Amino acid sequence: MTDQLPHEKGFHVSWDQLHRDARALAWRLDGKGPENGEWRALVAITRGGMAPAMIIARELDIRTVDTISIKSYDHQTQGAAQITKAPDMDLIGDGHGVLVIDDLVDTGRTLEVVRKLLPKAHIATVYAKPKSRDLVQTYVTEVSQDTWIFFPWDLALQYVEPYRGR
């Protein structure tokens, strides 16, 4: 048996699929905000959370949108999570009524940093892996821990050899 390359146990997400899944996440969050069902603000975790956050903000008519930048990956290698840009804390506060959006929870390192900064925020991701799905209040699709998700912003169209070769 040979070791699999990341693309061999991969989940390839197209722009269309991401849009459908982000809208499905918005539907799950609709009416669940603590202020008469409304969300006060949305914070996107950059960079992966920006595309789904844009879709969710539109679907839920959330006009106050900010970002938090946390770096934990260098290509496909994950290290310690560090905040490189915090949201406007005067606006966001402790996170009450704030929706935090990311594309994926994998090991949970990024969300642990976010939870410390915004303890009362509602954290939602489009995709979740089992190891850390308990850090997320709402998600759409669970994938196995050993699956690598290829997002549309990471891909380019090119020829791929058939699985069984020639």
Image (cartoon, grey):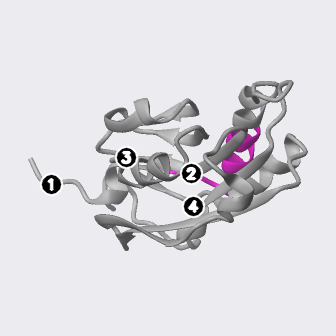
Q: Are marks 2 and 4 in contact (CB under 8 Å)?
A: yes
The disc placed on residue 3 is 1
Q: Is residue 47 left or right of residue 111?
A: right
Nearer to us of marks 3 and 1 is 3
Alpha carbon distance from label 3 to label 2: 12 Å
Mark 3 or 1, nearer chain start: 1
Mark 3 or 4, nearer chain start: 4
Alpha carbon distance from label 4 to label 1: 27 Å
Residue shown at 57%/67% (left/top)? Answer: 86
Q: Which residue is mark 3?
A: 108
Q: Quadrant of residue 96?
A: top right
Nearer to us of marks 4 and 1 is 4
Other residues around mark 1 within 10 Å, as few (<14) / some (14–19) / many (≥20): few
Measured as percent of width and height from the top left, residue 79 is found at 27, 66
Q: Are marks 3 and 1 in contact (CB under 8 Å)?
A: no
Mark 2 or 1, nearer chain start: 1
Q: Is residue 14 left or right of residue 35?
A: left
Measured as percent of width and height from the top left, residue 151 is found at 55, 59
Seen from the viewer's position, the closer of residues 155 and 144 is 144
The amino acid on which the numbered mark 3 sits, given as a three-letter code, is: Gly
Q: Secondary structure at mark 2?
A: strand
The amino acid on which the numbered mark 1 sits, given as a three-letter code, is: Asp
Seen from the viewer's position, the closer of residues 41 and 150 is 41
Q: Is residue 133 left or right of residue 41?
A: left
Magenta span: 12-23
The amino acid on which the numbered mark 2 sits, given as a three-letter code, is: Asp
